[in-house]
Amino acid sequence: MTIQESDRGGVQVISRAAAILRCLEDEPSGLSLGAIAKRSGLPRSTVQRLVDALAHEELLEVHGRGGVCLGPALMRLASHSHVDITQKARPYLEELSRVTGETAVLVGASGAELMILQSIVSPHALRVAPVAGNFLSIYATSGGKILLSTMHDQAICELLGPELKQFTPKTPTLPQLLKQLEQVRKVGFAYDFDEHTIGVGAIAVGIQTPQGRYAIDVVGPVWRIEQAKSAVETALLKCQEDLINGLRSID
């Protein structure tokens, strides 16, 4: 094989891998191998081989028979892209943390998990301090519920499965979660009081950016968040509006 032929083969592999990734761009609940093959026009055997390789590099995640979705490595790469949403959001999160006195967090979805992208930690001695780059359960967090609320219930069920792991006695079951998401869609806020971690409370709103959908959370001891619920909601709406206006320059 000549060098030129070898190069062409490598380019073809990259092109096919990119086609698979593009198929999954707007499919947070994932697609089956057959659906990917149909959309991309690639043989199923080729799709299987490339999905296995991409999953090995965490560029894809495979959840059973019907769930190939984008993986956490892509989220990490996106957080360091040229137009960096995490850095762009930082001054707005700093102001949100200053106004509320609590930790302000920017999060994004990665399959059935929630990835912490940016965290401005509260100055209080008693505080919640999530670490950027860590993952949480998407269904037991306020930010995760914001992101799930943009999906149809059937897609949510396919993504999460029928049985949700119970982190605390207040972690929602699937039927409870779906009912919560109905309310999230109506009011625009999502809540987590002792659902992911006992003693931790959070309120979140969503934000649509040129890089995708994210959520902004205010997180703290559950009793402080509950007492300041109205003020936190007002501060979140202000942060949401200011950040959206600030991101318009990216378009």
Image (cartoon, helix red, strand yellow):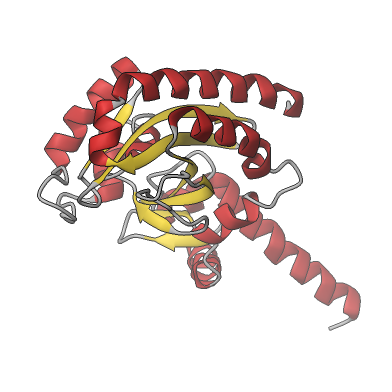
Q: Is residue 210 left or right of residue 146?
A: right
Closer to the camera in the image, 1 or 104: 104
Q: Can residue 184 be seen in this snapshot?
A: yes
**Direction front: furthest residue:** 125
Image location of residue 47, percent across then percent down: 52, 62
Q: Can residue 111 be seen in this snapshot?
A: no
Q: Is residue 194 left or right of residue 136?
A: left
Image location of residue 178, percent across then percent down: 20, 33
Q: How many marks?
A: 0
Q: Is residue 232 left or right of residue 183?
A: right
Quadrant containing the N terminus in the rendered view? bottom right
Give the residue drawn at x 25%, y 40%: 222
Q: Quadrant of residue 203?
A: top left
Image location of residue 169, percent across then percent down: 9, 50
Quadrant containing the C terminus in the rendered view? top right
Give the residue drawn at x 34%, y 24%: 189
Closer to the camera in the image, 152 or 182: 182
Give the residue drawn at x 25%, y 50%: 196
Q: Quadrant of residue 63?
A: bottom left
Image location of residue 164, percent across then percent down: 18, 52
Give the residue drawn at x 64%, y 56%: 77
Compared to residue 10, the image places residue 125 above or below, namely above
**Direction left: furthest residue:** 169
**Direction bottom: furthest residue:** 1
